[in-house]
Amino acid sequence: MTDMRIQANYSLKNHNTFHIDVKAHYLVEIEKQSDITTLRSDLKLAALPWMIIGGGSNLLFTHDLEKVVVSCRFKKIKVVKEDEDNIWLSVGAGLDWHTFVEYTVDHGYWGLENLALIPGTVGAAPVQNIGAYGAEAEDTITRVQTLNLFNGERREFRHSDCQFGYRQSIFKTEYENSLLVHRVTFRLRKAHAGHPNLYYEPLKEALNDRDKTELTSRDVFDAIVEIRQKRLPDPRIYGNAGSFFKNPIVSEEYFQKLVEKHGDIPYHKMLDNQYKIPAAWLIEQAGWKGKKCLNKTVGVSEKHALFLVNYGGANGEDIVMLSQRIREDIDHMFGIHLEREVIVLK
Ligand SMILES: Cc1cc2nc3c(=O)[nH]c(=O)nc-3n(C[C@H](O)[C@H](O)[C@H](O)COP(=O)(O)OP(=O)(O)OC[C@H]3O[C@@H](n4cnc5c(N)ncnc54)[C@H](O)[C@@H]3O)c2cc1C
């Protein structure tokens, strides 16, 4: 007898931040390791492809899914070990990310405060290697525990096994939809042992009138929440999945050519002498910021040019079409091919 939930022909409208109304053939919620083998022994479930969903905040659905959509309900936070300066927390993948970040600052820990208010779950944080305001999930992740979705087997990855990159990891490539992240271990600095990461200029400015030696992780968290609320469209009102495209990276030689043609271009110089250009700037230059189309059902946010928005009633294909038009314009103007950050389910 199991208490896991299996729902058939289930609408995912409240499981994706674009609010696209598609149906999953089955939605299953996994609470313990043995749920996987139990589900696999059900022939109608085993016959379908499986995919993993967290909060659906980086996904774009374009049609109903003839799949078993798996979500993870592990939510507990456990202290694994601690020493004078550090604490290691193992966290269930199903916990809401922002709730966990708030828990860490409430305890005075440093390390995750710059990643406040990112929608989604703890389990997706290593998969996506989420990042914002000068920090990435991989800076604090030490271990990732997974369950194999074919046989339920456990496997633990050390940081060095995860192949973390820019919004990348081994869980998104080699093990996509085959390993379910069920716990993630973070090493955080205790209140006296940490310090603020003010690498991101607007954050530094927001905290300018404060004595840096007295700042707490809660202060930085509050500043980040305020900045994000001001700068980004709230997905509860304006359906979106965050940055639609990745920031493109170009060679030094190509960057110089672009500067000759377009004048000043914002950039971030990487360690390998390549240049990262904000995709939002390119999209704004192409005149897309704030534009709406298809009877004003879809458009580019007026707050942030990297956010494509479902203003109500759009379907996934409408948003894909808008993204393609933007891509073509950027290709044409700058010779840069924008790569999607959002995962489109075709
Ligand atoms: C308003 C807004 C702002 C955002 N800002 C940022 C930002 O600043 N920085 C940033 O990096 N991202 C940002 N995002 C994107 C998004 O929040 C992250 O990608 C987040 O990690 C997605 O989490 P999720 O649980 O919703 O994952 P989902 O969107 O459900 O899934 C994303 C991918 O992870 C896989 N996955 C999810 N859970 C698991 C699991 N337990 N095990 C294995 N695979 C899993 C899925 O199969 C899928 O491939 C933003 C999104 C929105 C809507």
Image: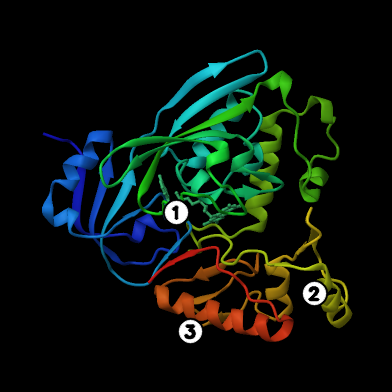
Q: How far apart are marks 3 and 2 (CA)?
A: 35 Å
Residue 254, numbered circle:
2
* Spot occupied by residue 340 in the image (x, y as percentages of width and height): 55, 68
Report crowding for label 3: few under 14, some 14 to 19, many 20 or more residues within 10 A (C-alpha): few
Quadrant where the C terminus is found in the figure: bottom left
The residue pinned by badge 3 equals 294
Q: What residue type is labelled 2?
A: Tyr
The residue pinned by badge 1 equals 174
Tell whether 267 sits left or right of 141. Answer: right
Quadrant where the N terminus is found in the figure: top left
Work out whether mark 1 precedes mark 2 in sequence or the reverse, and give the earlier one. Answer: 1
Q: Which residue extends farthest top?
A: 84
Residue 314 visible here: no
What residue appears at the point 46 percent right and 31 percent down from the top-left corner? Answer: 91
Report crowding for label 1: few under 14, some 14 to 19, many 20 or more residues within 10 A (C-alpha): few
Tell whether 223 sits left or right of 187. Answer: right
Circle 2: element type:
helix
Tell whether 216 sits left or right of 307. Answer: right
Instruction: Look at discs 3 and 1 and give the one toward the viewer.
Output: 1
* Spot occupied by residue 226 in the image (x, y as percentages of width and height): 67, 46
Circle 3: element type:
loop
Q: What residue type is labelled 3?
A: Leu
